[in-house]
Amino acid sequence: MKRSLHNSGPVLATGVEAGPLLPLHKQRDYRLLWTARTISVTGSEVSKLAIPLTAVTSLTASPSQMGMLTAAASVPALMFGLQSGAIADRLTRHRPLMIACELVSCAAAATVPLAWLFGLLNVTWLIVVALVIGSAGVLFRAANFPHVATVVPPARRTEAMAGLHASYSVASVSGPGLAGLLVQILTAPLAVLAEALSFLTSALLLRAIRTPEQNAPAPSRGMWRDVVAGLRAGVTHPVLRALLAAGVTINFFAMAYTAVYMLYMVNTLGIPKGMIGVLIALGGVGGLLGAWITARLSKRYGENRILLVSVIFFPMEILAVGLLTGPLWWKLALLAMTGTITGGIVVAFATCMGAITLRETSPELRGRVNATMTFAVQGVLAVGGLVGGIAAEFLGLRPVILICAAGMAMSSIWIWASPLRPRRPRPPAA
């Protein structure tokens, strides 16, 4: 998902210049934006391993401390998610805030290896760092979503969204391996330095973007009223409401499935622990393929049709896991195939969801509507994980997985019952 400035032509209201549309990979500013996100999220993937390992190996953290450390990363989204959208919609320029967020995250991450070298590091320090980086990340995402509309012309936004989602697939494939290598060479605390450098590099790349920003924010009526306006738009607009409901449904049952996934794979299916990481990585590979295919199919069929088709296949992997039996080679083959396909389906859905949200939301509400959706679909993750774990205690692992597959299928109802589904014209009355 990328787009860069054009060197000729008048500037449009979106900040994108008129003229012939270049392929995104040839547009300078989109390349900078994509590279910045890819480097930043890869560094974050490194820290997902390095920071917990630091707590366990260097600080001998207790289970309760590990729980707080894990929760610290998601708390800012629940506390400031809605407000961040209102802040983004008040700005005439989003890029300075994005750069500032990356620099704050860089400084916070850099304190971990420094504190460790001076003997000051403790679990509380790591929790504070996670809270700071998480808060900066919430603000960054709120500003980044409307900023894409500035850098990318409307005709290229689906392709741009696909490219940005591919960034996360690249990070999910390369990040864990890079993290393991850095931990082995540098030790876990020093490996966090890679995250700090990734944030710094991202900030420098974002600063090099030249697209002028000419946003016209709506007058603010106060934080609470601004937040309510975003909530109202997300709930009352029929297309946005369908996307919001489908996203919440998908994430709830996906997290309930994730809560029992590892136990089921190891104890019930007998999958070797080393192969689980390979299967997860294949999902990232599928995501790359999904981004590439979506960018091309959207030009021919449009985002609506891709969304309608992709949502049908969401339960495929979970259903296959719940019904899987047979020899190990068959289990691995089927899991590899369904995991790769599902990785592509997820990216296709998320890409079209983002492009449609940009299309259907008025410019002055984009930050708040995106924050509303992010708050809902991310906030439900904790609930889904809790429900999945408790349900497995009473029902067993396989029944919960099959219930999750059925629940995931319900997301199709929201999409297919919405205006996204093409309507056949009624015959004229006699």
Image: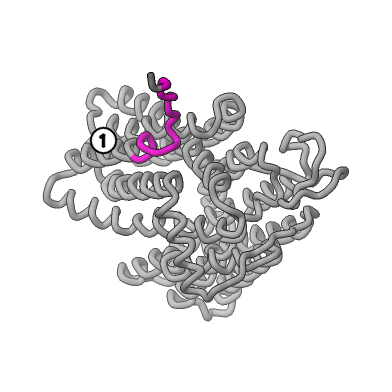
Amino acid type indicated by mark 1:
Gly
Q: Please name whichever residue, 192 or 383, is drawn nearer the observer in this view of the structure.
A: 383
Q: Please name whichever residue, 102 or 310, is drawn nearer the observer in this view of the structure.
A: 310
What is the total number of numbered labels drawn onto the structure image?
1
Residue at 48 percent across and 29 percent down: it is 305
Residue at 19 percent across and 39 percent down: it is 398
Q: Secondary structure at mark 1?
A: loop
In the displayed structure image, the side of residue 329 where residue 59 appears, left or right: right
Quadrant of the rendered image containing residue 379: bottom left
Quadrant of the rendered image containing residue 163: top right
Given the current orientation, which residue lies at the most extreme right position? 8
Residue 142 lies in the magenta-colored region: no
Q: Which residue is mark 1?
A: 270
In the displayed structure image, the side of residue 237 where residue 37 appears, left or right: right
Residue 426 lies in the magenta-colored region: yes
Q: Which residues are magenta?
A: 414-428
Residue 65, percent from left and from top? 35, 71
Q: Is residue 137 above or below residue 316?
A: below
Which secondary structure class fits the magenta region best? loop
Tell me if residue 60 can be seen: yes
Which of the image's four quarters has the N terminus? top right
Residue 119, percent from left and from top? 53, 79
Residue 397, percent from left and from top? 19, 43
Callout 1: 10 Å neighbours few (<14), some, many (20+)?
A: few
Residue 164, percent from left and from top? 60, 44
Q: Please name whichever residue, 130 or 224, is drawn nearer the observer in this view of the structure.
A: 224
Q: Please name whichever residue, 329 or 309, is drawn nearer the observer in this view of the structure.
A: 309
Q: Is residue 315 above or below residue 371?
A: above
Residue at 62 percent across and 67 percent down: it is 101
Residue at 55 percent across and 30 percent down: it is 302
Tell me if residue 282 can be seen: no
